[in-house]
Image (cartoon, rainbow, N blue to C red):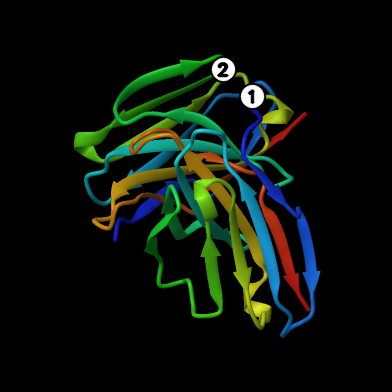
Amino acid sequence: DTGVSQNPRHKITKRGQNVTFRCDPISEHNRLYWYRQTLGQGPEFLTYFQNEAQLEKSRLLSDRFSAERPKGSFSTLEIQRTEQGDSAMYLCASSPRPQETQYFGPGTRLLVL
Amino acid sequence: GIQVEQSPPDLILQEGANSTLRCNFSDSVNNLQWFHQNPWGQLINLFYIPSGTKQNGRLSATTVATERYSLLYISSSQTTDSGVYFCAVEAYSGAGSYQLTFGKGTKLSVIP
């Protein structure tokens, strides 16, 4: 059990560029969550996958955001036409079953210039 | 949606002191987790505690679900305890997910 991993750990981009983040959950965890954390706040829910199906998306997830989880393994989160307001820590979490502990990855810190 | 309030927002302790952090939530929840976020941003699981009391070393937590609050106790604090402590409650969203709703955290600074 190597824990949840995320790549890259840091990303600096210019406004208008596209970025993609990757999350590898703990193996055999079929539930995967993305959260976003801005400075001084707690993480906020973005989206949820059960296996490969994206079952829920927050209103925070604008049309510029898209997430996938092909084959129910790793997940990617893409932000198109980045804006300065997208600067945040993007966190991924996984859990084996509902109502069990969610384990978080180290996060990807995005800075949009 | 569910509201989660944590208090105090900031706490400064002398090394060796004890502290109590509080988490209030506005509605019934399926579960509750306490996390410690280290200076590098990693969220470290402390407790998964829907009700009752749990202890792990110098840390313990109590959740009284019927009264909608949870407490995190830190005894004999150490400088390595510094960081932000988050309470997060889990509720079924109705769309299949048990998403976590976080409070704003308590920033703890332990000074030597």
Q: Does dot 1 land on a helix, a strand or a loop?
A: loop
Query: Is residue B6 placed above or below A58 in the rendered structure?
Result: above
Q: Earlier in the sequence, mark 1 or mark 2?
A: 2
Query: Is residue B94 placed above or below A27 in the rendered structure?
Result: below
Where is residue B97 drawn, in percent x and y? 34, 51
Q: Is residue B99 visible?
A: yes
Q: Residues within 10 Å of mark 2 (few under 14, many from 20)?
A: few
| B112 sits left or right of A44 in the view | right
Residue extending farthest front = A71
Q: Residues within 10 Å of mark 1 (few under 14, many from 20)?
A: many
Q: Disc 1 or disc 2, which is closer to the eye?
A: 2
The reply to whether dot 1 and dot 2 touch (C-beta < 8 Å) is yes
| A90 sits left or right of A45 in the view | right
Q: What residue is shown at x 45% (from left), y 41% (from top)?
A: A30
The numbered dot on residue B90 is: none
Looking at the picture, which amino acid does disc 2 mark? Arg
Chain for numbered disc 2: B
Where is residue B110 drawn, in percent x and y? 69, 34
Where is residue A28 drawn, in percent x and y? 50, 33
Closest to the observer, A31 or B24? A31
Residue extending farthest top = B57
Q: What residue is shown at x 26% (from left), y 51% (from top)?
A: B26
The numbered dot on residue B77 is: 1
Q: Does dot 2 land on a helix, a strand or a loop?
A: loop
Query: Is residue A10 placed above or below B107 in the rendered structure?
Result: below
* Image quadrant assignment for residue B51: top left
Looking at the picture, which amino acid does disc 1 mark? Ser
Q: Quadrant of the C terminus of chain B?
A: top right
The residue that disc 2 covers is: B58
Q: What residue is shown at x 56% (from left), y 17% (from top)?
A: B58
